[in-house]
Image (spheres, helix red, strand yellow):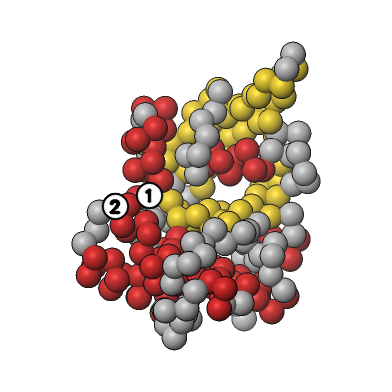
Amino acid sequence: MSERPVIEVEDVRRSYHLGDHVVHALAGVSLRIQRGEYLAIMGSSGSGKSTLMNILGCLDLPTGGRYRLDGVDVRDFDEDDLSDLRNRKIGFVFQAFNLVARTSALANVELPLAYARVPRRERRRRATIALRAVGMGQRLDHLPSELSGGQQQRVAVARALVTNPSLILADEPTGNLDSRSTRDVLEIFDLLCDGGRTIVVITHESEVGARADRIVRLADGKVVGDARKPAEVVA
């Protein structure tokens, strides 16, 4: 693992004003995630895991504390810089897939590269490689409506990979999948981690969390557990 963490969260707090009330969604979270880790963030509804996900993904900023991504303090960036940072450093996988309905699998995966102004031929080449890597090389021209839920999520994973990000953030990635498709997607995450990717999965499903090497548990906006899976003993 690299000496410098991919993620450094130091006493991060996030509060929201709801009328006269202040809701403390995060109440001092500290967390370090090294390159190549596979981590699950778990907690019940209202625990703060979605808020933490938004901050890790640079979709929201903390109201207190510090967050560094690949050694860069996100407070030093304006919104345009944060958008560029997200596109270069982070691959997102969402529960709802978030694919463009009338666009092919290949074109969906090309989108982050188009935003980065990568030339069309190179976009197509890299998107094709990413789709083949998740077992969708035979479905390049298919629309999302022509794909199963599991296949759509594979396309979403390919889209997350295509920019070669430092970090993959997956928010309830198996929430809309059946058990077979869930296993297929989790096996892809296993392979990505084995290949050196950093994976952070937000989930409430114990079987999904169990695939990670480390589980961080949140409650009331605080870390209440941080455990690593015991190393396997080789005979």
Horizontal side, residue 131 vs residue 84: left or right: right
Q: Are marks 1 and 2 in contact (CB under 8 Å)?
A: yes
Disc 2 crowd rating (10 Å Cα; few below 14, some 14-19, many 20+) is few
Q: Quadrant of residue 96?
A: bottom right
Q: Residue at x 42, y 75 (%)?
A: 131
* Percent coordinates x, y for residue 54 in the rendering: 56, 41
Instruction: Determine whether the residue tagged by mark 1 lies in a helix, strand or loop.
Output: helix
Q: Along the polypeptide, which appears first: circle 1 or circle 2?
A: 1
Residue 133 seen from this side: no
**In the depicted view, which residue is nearer to us: 213 or 3?**
213
Residue 231 seen from this side: yes
Q: Which residue is mark 2?
A: 116
* Percent coordinates x, y for residue 149 in the rendering: 63, 72
**In the depicted view, which residue is nearer to us: 135 or 98?**
98
Residue 220: mark: none
Q: Quadrant of residue 137?
A: bottom left
Residue type, numbered disc 1: Asn
- Kindly give the residue lying farthest to the front in the view shown: 102
Horizontal side, residue 134 vs residue 112: left or right: right
* Percent coordinates x, y for residue 221 in the rendering: 70, 33
Q: Quadrant of residue 81?
A: top left
Residue type, numbered disc 2: Ala
Q: Residue at x 51, y 47 (%)?
A: 33
Horizontal side, residue 63 vs residue 20: left or right: left
Disc 1 crowd rating (10 Å Cα; few below 14, some 14-19, many 20+) is some
Instruction: Determine whether the residue tagged by mark 2 lies in a helix, strand or loop.
Output: loop
Above/below status of 188 relative to 79: below
Q: Which residue is mark 1?
A: 87
